[in-house]
Image (cartoon, coloured by chain):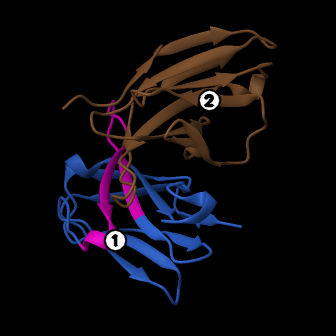
Chain colours: A blue, B brown
Amino acid sequence: AQRVTQPEKLLSVFKGAPVELKCNYSYSGSPELFWYVQYSRQRLQLLLRHISRESIKGFTADLNKGETSFHLKKPFAQEEDSAMYYCAPTVAGGTSYGKLTFGQGTILTVHP
Amino acid sequence: ETGVTQSPTHLIKTRGQQVTLRCSSQSGHNTVSWYQQALGQGPQFIFQYYREEENGRGNFPPRFSGLQFPNYSSELNVNALELDDSALYLCASSFRGSWETQYFGPGTRLLVL
């Protein structure tokens, strides 16, 4: 079964501190991995995707196929990073095409 | 570029009733996915529509059904509502072939009494 685990429901850091949001997945085939974010009173939106190898708002995510992890990292957290973060794999073929499997989410709070 | 819109924003129904939720996809998108988000949980995939046909379904009973129209807008229908159907229903549109970057609507909050 396809499963995504975000072990921390809540994560609090101070401004300027490094932050790491953990994501472990159990997925058949070769999933593509995404991080979605929901800021207060805003809709769910894409933060970054592994295939793009991009850095958005200072966040990066490293895929470790051996550990089946896709942790989200930022070296210096900002107050505006406070939000709900979801890890979400998907696949590009078969009957599960485009189906995002969301973790339970991690609420990140960055204190001033 | 117009984003994904959903209607209504809120809805209250009683157990056993039927409900229809609507979604207008983002301009240029041909795929619509529906998700159910219970309180405190991540969104759960209900189904996806591409070219007006269901293209993948999550672990939801047949009383959850949908439609996609030629303009790529979509409806989610739920029959015989149960209390556990109370949730935020999210619609997401995407262009198939772009690694499924999905753009979400604001959601419809359904309360079943």
The image's mark for residue A50 is 1
Query: Residue B47, how many percent across, how many down?
Result: 61, 42
Residue most extreme to the bottom: A66
Which segment is the magenta one? A34-53
Which residue is the site of mark 2? Answer: B66
Badge 2 crowding class, 10 Å Cα cut-off, few under 14, some 14 to 19, many 20 or more, is many
Residue A43 lies in magenta, yes or no? Answer: yes
Quadrant location, the N terminus of chain A: bottom right
Structural distance between the alpha carbons of marks 2 and 1: 31 Å
Q: Residue at the spot x=55%, y=19% of the render?
A: B21
Instruction: Give, as a three-letter code, the residue at label 2.
Output: Gly
Instruction: Give, as a three-letter code, the residue at label 1.
Output: His
Q: Residue at the spot x=65%, y=66% of the render?
A: A2
Q: Is residue B5 above or below residue B39?
A: above
Between disc 2 and disc 1, the foreground one is 2
Chain letter behind tag 1: A
Q: Is residue A56 visible?
A: yes
Q: Nearer the viewer, residue A112 or A57?
A: A57
**Left or right relative to B61: residue B95:** left
Q: Quadrant of residue B77?
A: top right
Q: Is residue B54 above or below residue A63?
A: above
Residue B76 lies in magenta, yes or no? Answer: no
Q: Secondary structure at mark 2?
A: strand
